[in-house]
Amino acid sequence: MTKKKIAVIGTGLVGTFHAETFFRNPNAELVAVCDINKEKVNSVAKQFNCKAYENFEKLIKSEDLDAISIATPEQIRIEPTVLSMEKGLMIFLEKPLGKDLNQIKLLVDRTKDYNKIISVNFILHEDPRYKLMKQKVRQNEIGNLVSCFARRRGSRAGIEIYAPWTDLLSSTLIHDIQMIMSINKSKPTRVFAEAVIRECEKFNSHDAVLALMKFADGSIASFETSWVLPKNQPEFLDPALHIIGDKGSIIIEGSSTGLSVQTESSFQKPDMVHWPIIDTKVDGCLKRNLDKFIDDCIFDKKPDVNLNDAFDAEKVVFAMKESINKGIPIDLIN
Ligand SMILES: NC(=O)c1ccc[n+]([C@@H]2O[C@H](COP(=O)([O-])OP(=O)(O)OC[C@H]3O[C@@H](n4cnc5c(N)ncnc54)[C@H](O)[C@@H]3O)[C@@H](O)[C@H]2O)c1
């Protein structure tokens, strides 16, 4: 089997995990990494034995590649994606898709006739619990969906690290919005959201958001998200998804899957789901989704979340922001 030649743009937290996973995948060849931070990119290139670039245009134009992975902040998502499309590459994109819905729409319009894979990294689809949940809903085991509840509460590390350049809904709650939209076959028709805006006012973001969503089939979903909890909260993210049908329910709670660690100085519920580091290597649903992308490229399979699916979730995120700003429910035009 020929290995898929791939490069990673952005070698921050998540891009370094991308590089590591492709480096370890026997069906991938990590050709290069790119970051505007010279020190960071050189160190990642050295660690994973590949070339280093500081300019993504130069990388895309000069290397012979099959695929690209784009893990820059979302402000720098659209340009490398368009250049990669012009080069005919298979594309793995971090979520969210961008900072501005009109720009995202332009990107989606440009990909209308693009026949190569564009996969967007909504990692919950590779969490076995969510996989089983989707399967059971598809097989009608809990009947018709009535209501869903999603929670994603982070520590205030989120405000420190992410609020200066992204926001709570686009970076965090979008995972749950997209997941609920992929479970519920009917389209969302209306959203209403309220926010607490205190520490995050200076970043034009929210400290906490509660939101409601109505679907065309009459079912409803509610969401709660925040990033204000102390940094020593036991679970680095406190997520949940509850699905209630008229013949049963499915409940997912937490990300430590039952593991808790008590020492003399701390109590922790380590993340065993998103990107745990096991035996010094990245693991969890982030790694599985990256490995799945390489499989999808090799076997020409459809990704779980393509650009249009991600765009649908972005429309809801921006409608929630509009609802918060205007203080009214927002109808969604599909
Ligand atoms: N799918 C997930 O579960 C998941 C998890 C974490 C982060 N993310 C997303 O991944 C993206 C990156 O997040 P992060 O936490 O790794 O951020 P980060 O700040 O740690 O890394 C971003 C990197 O991109 C680099 N960069 C910025 N502009 C660049 C450019 N023009 N060319 C090349 N490199 C450039 C920065 O120097 C930095 O090293 C964000 O959009 C975030 O929402 C997704």
Image: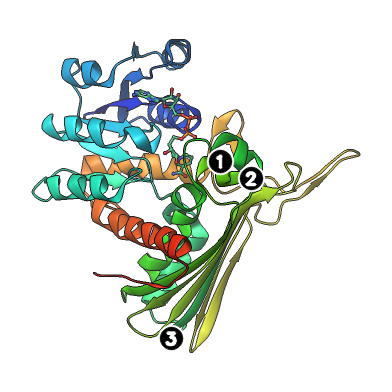
- Residue at label 1? 202
Is 277 situated left or right of 82 in this image? right
> Which color scheme is applied?
rainbow
Which corner quadrant of the image does residue 85 belong to? top left
Vertical placement of 256 versus 244: above or below? above
Q: Secondary structure at mark 3?
A: loop
Q: Amino acid at mark 1?
A: Lys
What distance separates the C-alpha of mark 3 from that of mark 1? 45 Å
What distance separates the C-alpha of mark 1 from that of mark 2? 7 Å
Residue 16: x %, y % from top left: 46, 27
Query: Outermost residue toward the left?
Result: 113
In the picture, the quarter occupied by the C terminus is bottom left
Is 273 situated left or right of 302 in this image? right
Mark sitting on residue 199: 2
Q: Amino acid at mark 3?
A: Gly
- Residue at label 3? 143
Q: Amino acid at mark 2?
A: Glu
Mark 3 or 1: in front is 1
User: Dot 1: within a 10 Å radius of its alpha carbon, few (fewer than 14), some, or many (20 or more) residues?
Assistant: few
Residue pictured at 55% horizontal, 51% vertical? 206
Q: Are the residues at dot 2 and dot 3 in contact (C-beta closer than 8 Å)? A: no
